[in-house]
Amino acid sequence: MAKQNNSDISKRVRNIPPGTSVESYLIHGRHFTDKWDFRHHIIPPISSSVTYRLDKTERGARGFQEYASGDAHRTKPIYIYDRLDEPTRGMLEDELANVEGGEFCVAFSTGMAAISAALGVLLNAGDELVSHKTLYGCTYSLFTNWYPRLNIKTNLLDLRRPNDLKAAITDKTRAVYFESPVNPTLELIDIGEVRKIVDEVNKKRAADRQVYIVVDNTFATPYCQRPLELGAHVVVHSLTKNIGGYGTDMGGAVIGPAELEGQVLLYRKDFGAALAPKSAWPILVYGLPTLPLRLKQQMQTAEQVAQFLNGHPKVAKVAYPGLSTHPQLALAKKQMRTPDGQFAPGNMIYFETVEKDPGQPHNNIKVVDWIAKNAYTLTLAVSLGQLRTLIENPGAMTHAAVPPEKRLEGGITPNGIRLSIGVESADDIIRDLEKALAQAD
Ligand SMILES: Cc1ncc(COP(=O)(O)O)c(C=O)c1O
Protein backbone atom coordinates (compact mmCIF):
# COMPACT_ATOMS: atom_id res chain seq x y z
CA MET A 1 0.00 0.00 0.00
CA ALA A 2 1.41 3.42 -0.94
CA LYS A 3 2.46 5.35 2.12
CA GLN A 4 1.27 8.91 2.46
CA ASN A 5 4.06 11.30 3.22
CA ASN A 6 2.92 14.78 4.01
CA SER A 7 5.38 15.41 6.76
CA ASP A 8 7.03 18.36 4.96
CA ILE A 9 4.73 21.13 6.11
CA SER A 10 6.91 23.86 4.60
CA LYS A 11 5.05 23.21 1.35
CA ARG A 12 1.96 24.69 2.99
CA VAL A 13 3.40 27.22 5.45
CA ARG A 14 5.36 30.26 4.37
CA ASN A 15 8.74 31.14 5.91
CA ILE A 16 9.61 27.87 7.59
CA PRO A 17 12.61 25.77 6.52
CA PRO A 18 12.06 23.23 3.72
CA GLY A 19 11.60 19.71 5.06
CA THR A 20 10.16 20.83 8.44
CA SER A 21 8.09 18.03 10.00
CA VAL A 22 4.60 18.50 11.41
CA GLU A 23 5.99 17.62 14.86
CA SER A 24 8.47 20.53 14.78
CA TYR A 25 5.95 22.91 13.25
CA LEU A 26 3.47 22.24 16.05
CA ILE A 27 6.15 23.21 18.57
CA HIS A 28 7.55 26.27 16.82
CA GLY A 29 4.72 27.57 14.67
CA ARG A 30 5.98 30.44 12.54
CA HIS A 31 7.53 32.43 15.44
CA PHE A 32 5.24 35.25 14.43
CA THR A 33 1.94 35.85 12.76
CA ASP A 34 0.95 38.30 10.06
CA LYS A 35 -1.81 39.28 12.43
CA TRP A 36 0.37 40.15 15.39
CA ASP A 37 4.15 40.38 15.71
CA PHE A 38 5.46 38.56 18.80
CA ARG A 39 8.89 37.62 17.46
CA HIS A 40 10.61 38.35 20.79
CA HIS A 41 8.40 36.04 22.78
CA ILE A 42 9.24 32.35 23.05
CA ILE A 43 5.66 31.58 24.04
CA PRO A 44 2.90 33.34 22.07
CA PRO A 45 1.29 35.83 24.45
CA ILE A 46 -2.41 35.82 25.34
CA SER A 47 -4.24 38.75 23.92
CA SER A 48 -7.10 39.67 26.20
CA SER A 49 -9.06 42.59 24.83
CA VAL A 50 -12.75 42.56 24.06
CA THR A 51 -12.57 45.66 21.95
CA TYR A 52 -9.89 47.38 19.83
CA ARG A 53 -8.78 50.98 19.44
CA LEU A 54 -9.57 52.26 15.96
CA ASP A 55 -7.60 55.21 14.62
CA LYS A 56 -10.48 56.57 12.56
CA THR A 57 -14.13 55.93 11.82
CA GLU A 58 -13.34 54.85 8.28
CA ARG A 59 -11.22 51.92 9.56
CA GLY A 60 -14.01 50.72 11.85
CA ALA A 61 -16.57 51.07 9.07
CA ARG A 62 -14.34 49.10 6.67
CA GLY A 63 -13.89 46.29 9.20
CA PHE A 64 -17.62 46.00 9.80
CA GLN A 65 -18.32 46.13 6.09
CA GLU A 66 -15.86 43.30 5.40
CA TYR A 67 -17.39 41.08 8.08
CA ALA A 68 -20.97 41.83 7.15
CA SER A 69 -20.30 41.04 3.51
CA GLY A 70 -18.64 37.72 4.36
CA ASP A 71 -15.40 39.09 2.92
CA ALA A 72 -13.14 39.51 5.94
CA HIS A 73 -9.41 39.64 5.06
CA ARG A 74 -7.90 37.48 7.70
CA THR A 75 -4.27 37.88 6.74
CA LYS A 76 -4.56 41.62 7.43
CA PRO A 77 -7.64 41.82 9.63
CA ILE A 78 -9.03 45.00 11.09
CA TYR A 79 -9.46 44.02 14.71
CA ILE A 80 -12.67 45.50 16.03
CA TYR A 81 -14.23 43.19 18.61
CA ASP A 82 -13.26 39.78 20.02
CA ARG A 83 -16.27 37.90 18.61
CA LEU A 84 -15.28 38.94 15.07
CA ASP A 85 -11.55 38.23 15.14
CA GLU A 86 -8.75 38.11 17.67
CA PRO A 87 -4.98 37.36 17.37
CA THR A 88 -4.41 34.54 19.94
CA ARG A 89 -7.30 32.56 18.53
CA GLY A 90 -6.08 33.54 15.06
CA MET A 91 -2.70 31.88 15.65
CA LEU A 92 -4.40 28.69 16.77
CA GLU A 93 -6.62 28.84 13.68
CA ASP A 94 -3.61 29.22 11.37
CA GLU A 95 -1.89 26.16 12.85
CA LEU A 96 -5.03 24.04 12.73
CA ALA A 97 -5.68 24.97 9.09
CA ASN A 98 -2.07 24.13 8.22
CA VAL A 99 -1.94 20.72 9.91
CA GLU A 100 -5.31 19.67 8.48
CA GLY A 101 -4.35 20.98 5.04
CA GLY A 102 -7.30 23.39 4.85
CA GLU A 103 -7.47 26.90 3.46
CA PHE A 104 -9.04 28.38 6.57
CA CYS A 105 -9.97 27.56 10.15
CA VAL A 106 -12.55 29.31 12.30
CA ALA A 107 -12.55 28.38 16.00
CA PHE A 108 -15.61 28.12 18.21
CA SER A 109 -16.31 27.82 21.92
CA THR A 110 -17.13 24.09 21.68
CA GLY A 111 -17.15 21.25 19.18
CA MET A 112 -20.96 21.40 19.00
CA ALA A 113 -20.78 25.11 18.09
CA ALA A 114 -18.34 24.21 15.29
CA ILE A 115 -20.59 21.43 13.95
CA SER A 116 -23.63 23.74 14.10
CA ALA A 117 -21.70 26.43 12.21
CA ALA A 118 -20.30 24.16 9.48
CA LEU A 119 -23.74 22.78 8.72
CA GLY A 120 -25.41 26.12 9.44
CA VAL A 121 -23.66 27.71 6.47
CA LEU A 122 -24.31 24.75 4.16
CA LEU A 123 -27.98 24.06 4.90
CA ASN A 124 -31.07 26.19 4.38
CA ALA A 125 -34.67 25.44 5.32
CA GLY A 126 -35.96 22.79 2.93
CA ASP A 127 -32.52 21.24 2.36
CA GLU A 128 -31.54 17.71 3.33
CA LEU A 129 -28.59 16.27 5.18
CA VAL A 130 -27.33 12.70 4.77
CA SER A 131 -25.48 11.33 7.77
CA HIS A 132 -24.03 8.11 9.13
CA LYS A 133 -26.55 6.74 11.62
CA THR A 134 -24.12 6.40 14.54
CA LEU A 135 -22.97 9.75 15.86
CA TYR A 136 -21.91 11.49 19.04
CA GLY A 137 -25.15 11.86 21.09
CA CYS A 138 -25.41 15.67 20.92
CA THR A 139 -24.80 15.68 17.16
CA TYR A 140 -27.58 13.10 16.83
CA SER A 141 -29.80 15.33 18.96
CA LEU A 142 -28.95 18.39 16.82
CA PHE A 143 -29.99 16.53 13.67
CA THR A 144 -33.11 14.86 15.06
CA ASN A 145 -34.45 17.42 17.59
CA TRP A 146 -33.48 20.77 16.13
CA TYR A 147 -33.17 20.39 12.37
CA PRO A 148 -36.81 19.32 11.92
CA ARG A 149 -37.78 22.67 13.52
CA LEU A 150 -35.75 24.41 10.80
CA ASN A 151 -37.34 22.23 8.11
CA ILE A 152 -34.04 20.43 7.45
CA LYS A 153 -34.49 16.69 6.95
CA THR A 154 -31.73 14.32 8.03
CA ASN A 155 -31.43 10.98 6.32
CA LEU A 156 -29.56 8.65 8.72
CA LEU A 157 -28.06 5.53 7.15
CA ASP A 158 -25.06 3.23 7.11
CA LEU A 159 -22.40 5.11 5.14
CA ARG A 160 -20.22 2.00 5.11
CA ARG A 161 -22.52 0.93 2.24
CA PRO A 162 -21.80 3.22 -0.75
CA ASN A 163 -24.92 2.11 -2.64
CA ASP A 164 -27.13 3.26 0.23
CA LEU A 165 -25.46 6.67 0.05
CA LYS A 166 -26.08 6.88 -3.71
CA ALA A 167 -29.76 6.14 -3.16
CA ALA A 168 -30.08 8.58 -0.25
CA ILE A 169 -28.85 11.71 -2.03
CA THR A 170 -31.80 13.69 -3.41
CA ASP A 171 -32.00 17.03 -5.24
CA LYS A 172 -32.38 18.67 -1.85
CA THR A 173 -29.24 17.14 -0.29
CA ARG A 174 -26.53 19.72 0.46
CA ALA A 175 -24.24 17.90 2.90
CA VAL A 176 -23.01 14.43 3.84
CA TYR A 177 -21.86 14.24 7.46
CA PHE A 178 -20.02 11.58 9.45
CA GLU A 179 -17.40 10.80 12.06
CA SER A 180 -14.55 8.44 11.24
CA PRO A 181 -13.72 6.65 13.46
CA VAL A 182 -17.31 6.73 14.66
CA ASN A 183 -18.02 7.60 18.30
CA PRO A 184 -18.25 5.21 20.11
CA THR A 185 -18.23 2.09 17.91
CA LEU A 186 -14.97 2.85 16.06
CA GLU A 187 -16.47 1.87 12.73
CA LEU A 188 -14.77 3.63 9.83
CA ILE A 189 -16.24 5.38 6.82
CA ASP A 190 -14.25 5.30 3.58
CA ILE A 191 -13.83 9.02 2.89
CA GLY A 192 -12.49 8.49 -0.64
CA GLU A 193 -15.45 6.27 -1.57
CA VAL A 194 -17.93 8.84 -0.26
CA ARG A 195 -16.12 11.50 -2.31
CA LYS A 196 -16.42 9.46 -5.52
CA ILE A 197 -20.19 9.25 -5.09
CA VAL A 198 -20.53 12.93 -4.20
CA ASP A 199 -18.38 13.93 -7.18
CA GLU A 200 -20.78 12.07 -9.49
CA VAL A 201 -23.67 14.03 -8.02
CA ASN A 202 -21.83 17.37 -8.09
CA LYS A 203 -20.89 16.98 -11.76
CA LYS A 204 -24.57 17.39 -12.62
CA ARG A 205 -25.20 20.30 -10.26
CA ALA A 206 -24.89 24.07 -10.43
CA ALA A 207 -22.05 25.65 -8.44
CA ASP A 208 -24.45 26.93 -5.78
CA ARG A 209 -26.10 23.50 -5.26
CA GLN A 210 -22.97 21.41 -4.65
CA VAL A 211 -22.98 18.71 -1.97
CA TYR A 212 -20.28 19.11 0.70
CA ILE A 213 -18.71 16.28 2.70
CA VAL A 214 -18.22 17.25 6.34
CA VAL A 215 -16.11 14.95 8.53
CA ASP A 216 -15.81 15.10 12.32
CA ASN A 217 -12.12 14.27 12.87
CA THR A 218 -12.24 14.60 16.67
CA PHE A 219 -11.26 10.99 17.41
CA ALA A 220 -8.31 10.79 15.02
CA THR A 221 -6.98 14.41 15.02
CA PRO A 222 -4.88 15.63 12.08
CA TYR A 223 -1.96 13.72 13.55
CA CYS A 224 -3.65 10.39 12.78
CA GLN A 225 -5.84 11.29 9.79
CA ARG A 226 -6.37 14.24 7.45
CA PRO A 227 -9.83 13.92 5.89
CA LEU A 228 -9.29 16.84 3.49
CA GLU A 229 -6.45 14.90 1.83
CA LEU A 230 -8.72 11.87 1.63
CA GLY A 231 -11.65 13.63 -0.04
CA ALA A 232 -13.65 15.58 2.56
CA HIS A 233 -14.50 19.24 1.86
CA VAL A 234 -14.81 20.36 5.48
CA VAL A 235 -13.42 19.06 8.77
CA VAL A 236 -14.90 19.79 12.18
CA HIS A 237 -13.30 19.22 15.56
CA SER A 238 -14.03 19.26 19.20
CA LEU A 239 -10.80 20.86 20.44
CA THR A 240 -11.97 19.90 23.94
CA LYS A 241 -10.67 16.38 23.29
CA ASN A 242 -7.40 15.06 21.85
CA ILE A 243 -6.21 18.38 20.41
CA GLY A 244 -6.66 20.32 23.68
CA GLY A 245 -5.29 17.21 25.35
CA TYR A 246 -5.38 18.24 29.00
CA GLY A 247 -9.08 18.54 29.74
CA THR A 248 -8.83 22.16 30.84
CA ASP A 249 -10.62 24.00 28.03
CA MET A 250 -13.46 23.54 25.59
CA GLY A 251 -13.20 24.47 21.93
CA GLY A 252 -14.23 23.62 18.39
CA ALA A 253 -12.99 24.27 14.86
CA VAL A 254 -14.24 24.33 11.28
CA ILE A 255 -11.55 23.85 8.63
CA GLY A 256 -12.19 23.91 4.92
CA PRO A 257 -11.96 25.58 1.51
CA ALA A 258 -11.57 29.36 1.13
CA GLU A 259 -14.99 29.70 -0.50
CA LEU A 260 -16.67 28.98 2.86
CA GLU A 261 -14.46 31.13 5.11
CA GLY A 262 -16.48 34.33 4.90
CA GLN A 263 -19.74 32.54 5.61
CA VAL A 264 -18.35 30.65 8.61
CA LEU A 265 -16.92 33.90 10.03
CA LEU A 266 -20.23 35.62 9.47
CA TYR A 267 -22.03 32.75 11.19
CA ARG A 268 -19.71 33.07 14.20
CA LYS A 269 -20.20 36.85 14.29
CA ASP A 270 -23.99 36.54 14.31
CA PHE A 271 -24.65 33.32 16.22
CA GLY A 272 -21.75 33.88 18.63
CA ALA A 273 -19.89 31.01 20.31
CA ALA A 274 -16.42 32.35 19.42
CA LEU A 275 -13.56 30.56 21.16
CA ALA A 276 -12.31 32.74 24.04
CA PRO A 277 -8.61 33.71 23.65
CA LYS A 278 -7.99 32.44 27.19
CA SER A 279 -9.12 29.01 25.98
CA ALA A 280 -7.36 29.25 22.62
CA TRP A 281 -4.03 29.90 24.36
CA PRO A 282 -3.63 26.56 26.24
CA ILE A 283 -4.70 24.66 23.13
CA LEU A 284 -2.05 26.56 21.13
CA VAL A 285 0.70 26.43 23.76
CA TYR A 286 0.18 23.01 25.38
CA GLY A 287 -2.26 21.04 23.24
CA LEU A 288 -0.92 21.28 19.69
CA PRO A 289 2.83 21.09 20.51
CA THR A 290 2.35 17.87 22.52
CA LEU A 291 -0.26 16.27 20.24
CA PRO A 292 2.18 13.93 18.40
CA LEU A 293 3.98 12.93 21.62
CA ARG A 294 0.77 12.19 23.47
CA LEU A 295 -0.82 10.28 20.63
CA LYS A 296 2.28 8.19 19.92
CA GLN A 297 2.33 7.09 23.57
CA GLN A 298 -1.43 6.60 23.77
CA MET A 299 -1.50 4.52 20.59
CA GLN A 300 1.20 2.20 21.89
CA THR A 301 -0.76 1.72 25.10
CA ALA A 302 -4.10 1.41 23.30
CA GLU A 303 -2.68 -1.42 21.19
CA GLN A 304 -1.61 -3.31 24.34
CA VAL A 305 -4.89 -2.69 26.16
CA ALA A 306 -6.91 -3.73 23.08
CA GLN A 307 -4.87 -6.96 22.82
CA PHE A 308 -5.45 -7.66 26.51
CA LEU A 309 -9.20 -7.11 26.19
CA ASN A 310 -9.39 -9.14 22.99
CA GLY A 311 -8.13 -12.26 24.75
CA HIS A 312 -10.18 -11.83 27.93
CA PRO A 313 -12.91 -14.41 28.68
CA LYS A 314 -15.28 -11.76 30.13
CA VAL A 315 -15.03 -9.60 27.01
CA ALA A 316 -17.37 -10.43 24.12
CA LYS A 317 -16.01 -8.02 21.50
CA VAL A 318 -13.33 -5.36 21.10
CA ALA A 319 -13.22 -2.60 18.48
CA TYR A 320 -9.90 -0.86 17.95
CA PRO A 321 -8.85 0.13 14.42
CA GLY A 322 -5.33 -1.21 15.06
CA LEU A 323 -6.44 -4.75 15.98
CA SER A 324 -6.10 -7.49 13.38
CA THR A 325 -9.70 -8.46 14.24
CA HIS A 326 -11.11 -5.04 13.29
CA PRO A 327 -13.37 -5.77 10.29
CA GLN A 328 -12.10 -2.64 8.50
CA LEU A 329 -8.38 -3.02 9.22
CA ALA A 330 -7.45 -2.45 5.57
CA LEU A 331 -9.41 0.80 5.48
CA ALA A 332 -7.87 1.85 8.81
CA LYS A 333 -4.44 1.32 7.28
CA LYS A 334 -5.42 3.32 4.23
CA GLN A 335 -6.82 6.39 5.97
CA MET A 336 -5.33 6.53 9.45
CA ARG A 337 -1.74 7.64 8.97
CA THR A 338 0.55 10.14 10.66
CA PRO A 339 1.82 12.90 8.36
CA ASP A 340 4.98 10.83 7.78
CA GLY A 341 2.96 7.78 6.81
CA GLN A 342 2.96 5.61 9.96
CA PHE A 343 -0.21 3.63 10.73
CA ALA A 344 -2.04 5.61 13.42
CA PRO A 345 -5.17 3.86 14.72
CA GLY A 346 -5.78 6.35 17.55
CA ASN A 347 -6.36 6.13 21.28
CA MET A 348 -10.03 5.06 21.52
CA ILE A 349 -11.30 1.54 22.26
CA TYR A 350 -14.85 0.19 22.41
CA PHE A 351 -15.58 -3.18 24.00
CA GLU A 352 -18.51 -5.27 25.16
CA THR A 353 -18.70 -7.40 28.28
CA VAL A 354 -19.96 -10.99 28.14
CA GLU A 355 -23.55 -11.01 29.45
CA LYS A 356 -25.90 -13.91 30.31
CA ASP A 357 -28.81 -11.82 29.01
CA PRO A 358 -27.48 -9.27 26.48
CA GLY A 359 -30.86 -7.49 26.58
CA GLN A 360 -30.45 -6.88 30.31
CA PRO A 361 -26.71 -6.47 30.77
CA HIS A 362 -25.23 -5.92 34.19
CA ASN A 363 -21.56 -6.91 33.87
CA ASN A 364 -20.72 -3.68 32.05
CA ILE A 365 -22.14 -1.64 34.94
CA LYS A 366 -20.35 -3.86 37.49
CA VAL A 367 -17.02 -3.41 35.72
CA VAL A 368 -17.35 0.35 35.26
CA ASP A 369 -18.70 0.93 38.77
CA TRP A 370 -15.85 -1.11 40.25
CA ILE A 371 -13.46 1.12 38.33
CA ALA A 372 -15.24 4.27 39.54
CA LYS A 373 -14.71 3.25 43.17
CA ASN A 374 -11.42 1.36 43.11
CA ALA A 375 -9.25 1.90 40.04
CA TYR A 376 -6.20 4.14 40.22
CA THR A 377 -5.41 4.65 36.53
CA LEU A 378 -8.93 4.64 35.07
CA THR A 379 -11.57 7.28 35.79
CA LEU A 380 -15.30 7.05 35.15
CA ALA A 381 -15.88 10.23 33.18
CA VAL A 382 -17.15 11.31 29.77
CA SER A 383 -15.00 13.24 27.30
CA LEU A 384 -11.81 11.82 25.84
CA GLY A 385 -8.28 12.54 24.75
CA GLN A 386 -6.79 13.51 28.12
CA LEU A 387 -3.64 12.44 29.98
CA ARG A 388 -5.84 10.25 32.18
CA THR A 389 -7.53 7.12 30.90
CA LEU A 390 -11.30 7.69 30.90
CA ILE A 391 -14.02 5.05 30.81
CA GLU A 392 -17.78 5.35 30.33
CA ASN A 393 -20.94 3.53 29.25
CA PRO A 394 -21.94 5.32 26.00
CA GLY A 395 -25.51 3.95 25.93
CA ALA A 396 -26.20 5.44 29.35
CA MET A 397 -24.14 8.60 29.02
CA THR A 398 -22.62 10.20 25.90
CA HIS A 399 -25.19 8.61 23.59
CA ALA A 400 -28.21 8.76 25.92
CA ALA A 401 -29.88 11.22 23.49
CA VAL A 402 -30.14 8.41 20.91
CA PRO A 403 -33.35 6.34 21.41
CA PRO A 404 -32.56 2.76 22.61
CA GLU A 405 -33.72 1.06 19.40
CA LYS A 406 -31.65 3.48 17.28
CA ARG A 407 -28.64 2.87 19.51
CA LEU A 408 -28.94 -0.86 18.88
CA GLU A 409 -29.31 -0.31 15.13
CA GLY A 410 -26.17 1.83 15.25
CA GLY A 411 -24.13 -0.79 17.10
CA ILE A 412 -24.19 1.01 20.48
CA THR A 413 -25.00 -2.07 22.50
CA PRO A 414 -26.25 -1.83 26.12
CA ASN A 415 -23.15 -3.76 27.28
CA GLY A 416 -20.73 -1.42 25.45
CA ILE A 417 -17.91 0.40 27.22
CA ARG A 418 -15.78 3.21 25.75
CA LEU A 419 -12.18 3.73 26.76
CA SER A 420 -10.06 6.79 26.04
CA ILE A 421 -6.48 5.77 26.67
CA GLY A 422 -4.28 8.22 28.55
CA VAL A 423 -0.52 8.32 29.05
CA GLU A 424 -0.30 6.10 32.14
CA SER A 425 1.77 2.92 31.93
CA ALA A 426 -0.02 0.19 29.94
CA ASP A 427 0.71 -2.34 32.71
CA ASP A 428 -1.06 -0.20 35.29
CA ILE A 429 -4.14 0.27 33.11
CA ILE A 430 -4.26 -3.45 32.33
CA ARG A 431 -3.89 -4.36 36.03
CA ASP A 432 -6.88 -2.13 36.88
CA LEU A 433 -8.92 -3.58 34.00
CA GLU A 434 -8.02 -7.14 35.03
CA LYS A 435 -9.33 -6.55 38.55
CA ALA A 436 -12.43 -4.79 37.22
CA LEU A 437 -13.26 -7.62 34.79
CA ALA A 438 -12.88 -10.14 37.62
CA GLN A 439 -16.06 -8.57 39.07
CA ALA A 440 -18.09 -9.76 36.05
CA ASP A 441 -19.97 -13.06 36.46
C1 LIG B 1 -16.88 13.00 18.07
C2 LIG B 1 -17.33 14.23 18.82
N1 LIG B 1 -17.68 15.32 18.14
C3 LIG B 1 -18.10 16.44 18.76
C4 LIG B 1 -18.19 16.50 20.13
C5 LIG B 1 -18.68 17.74 20.78
O1 LIG B 1 -17.63 18.45 21.35
P1 LIG B 1 -17.81 19.52 22.51
O2 LIG B 1 -18.12 18.76 23.76
O3 LIG B 1 -16.51 20.25 22.54
O4 LIG B 1 -18.95 20.41 22.13
C6 LIG B 1 -17.84 15.38 20.88
C7 LIG B 1 -17.93 15.42 22.35
O5 LIG B 1 -17.77 14.42 23.02
C8 LIG B 1 -17.39 14.21 20.20
O6 LIG B 1 -17.04 13.10 20.87
Image: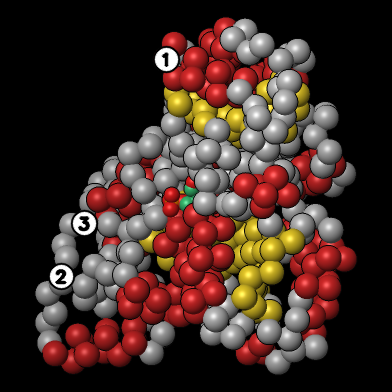
396 sits to left or right of 230: left
The N terminus - image quarter: top right
Q: In the rendered view, would you say 369 is above or below 173?
A: above
**Gap in Å between the C-alphas at discs 1 and 3?**
42 Å
User: Which residue is nearer to you in this view: 257 or 155?
Assistant: 155
- Quadrant location of residue 393? top right
- Kind of residue at badge 3: Ser
Specify the label residue 373 is tagged with. Answer: 1
379 sits to left or right of 119: left
Disc 2 is placed on an element classified as loop
- Kind of residue at badge 1: Lys
Q: Do we see residue 259 in this rendering?
A: no
Q: Position of residue 411 (x, y in %)?
A: 71, 43
The C terminus - image quarter: top right
**Gap in Å between the C-alphas at discs 2 and 3?**
11 Å
Q: Which residue is mark 2?
A: 51
Q: Earlier in the sequence, mark 1 or mark 3?
A: 3
Specify the label residue 47 is tagged with. Answer: 3
Disc 1 and disc 3 in contact, CB within 8 angstroms: no
Q: In the rendered view, would you say 239 is above or below 248?
A: below
55 sits to left or right of 114: left
Disc 3 is placed on an element classified as loop
Q: Nearer the viewer, mark 1 or mark 2?
A: 1
Q: In the rendered view, would you say 87 is above or below 392?
A: below
Disc 1 and disc 2 in contact, CB within 8 angstroms: no
Asked if disc 1 is less than 8 Å from ligand 1, the answer is no
Residue at 49% x, 20% y: name it.
369
- Quadrant location of residue 265? bottom left
